[in-house]
Image (cartoon, helix red, strand yellow):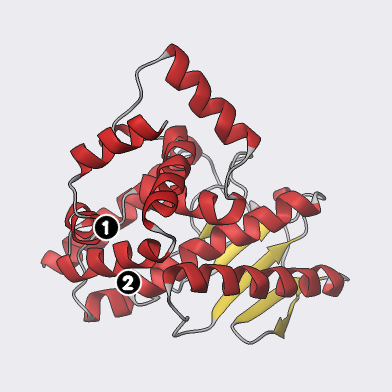
Amino acid sequence: MKILKYILLTLIFICTAFGQSFGKNKVQYQSFDWSYIQTSHFDIYFYGDNQDLAEFTSKVSEDAYAQISTHLSWDLRKRVSILVYNSHNEFQQTNVIGTYMSEGIGGVTELFKNRIVFPFDGNFEQFRHVIHHELVHAMLNDMVYGGTAQNMMASRTKVRIPLWSNEGLAEFLSSNWDTKADMVLRDIAVHERMPTINELNYFMAYKGGQSLWRFIAGKYGREKVGEVFRSMKKAQSAEKGYQLALGMKWKELSDQWHKYL
């Protein structure tokens, strides 16, 4: 019963990312004739005359995998399926995720089968970022939860990765540090009170979390990234995982991060 309760809480947690999408109807106007190509770690699904896009996706995915694997000190135990839609309108028709995909959602990694779904919007640089970002989620799903909801239940894993930890790391590993993040954090540091770790919600879960991971990697070394998540899984607690890996609770980590900023 506790495991079932955790699964339900996890579903609620995932769905909060799509809060603005609730209440909208998803309509599938067309069926898609999928083909796929394979790499060492991924099955890339595409349709229409977009094999070139699938080839691009495969190259970016394997390059991103090598970088993420190094930071996490983790190799995928199960192949990951990546579904590429030709437009956001067609992406909104996906049946991989039941939630309506609003315009602000650039990609999704679902927990049940650890599949990645995203559209190509015509911008290759942004597309590269989305691929890398979503692969971080897939790697963390594999590392902490076993790659599927079934494995999560079998291993009795109850820890929940905080949104700021998950999204922040995805931004940090896919962008390292970018102008947008720098402007956001500078503006907050000058004009507002800096949020604590527990206050990193909504947009700040992404950019604040990105800044926090930048601080951790710079101060303790990038090898600490994977250690945090291994400790998190071992302790079955997000905060205890950070404490075991870094030697401090979130309050002290918040203070150290603020001083760094």
Helix, strand or loop status at disc 1: loop
The quadrant holding residue 179 is top right
Residue 78: % across, % down: 47, 84
Above or below residue 195? Residue 43 is: below
**Left or right relative to 163: residue 91:** right
The quadrant holding residue 6 is bottom left
Q: Which amino acid does label 2 sit on?
A: Tyr
Q: Mark 1 points at which residue?
A: 160
Q: As rendered, which of 38 and 221 lies closer to the eye?
A: 221
Residue 73: % across, % down: 43, 75
Above or below residue 104? Residue 124 is: below
Q: Residues within 10 Å of mark 2 (few under 14, many from 20)?
A: many
Q: Name the residue under label 2.
A: 145
**Left or right relative to 138: residue 141:** left
At horizontal 31% and vertical 80% (from top left) the residue drawn is 151
Helix, strand or loop status at disc 2: helix
**Left or right relative to 261: residue 228:** left
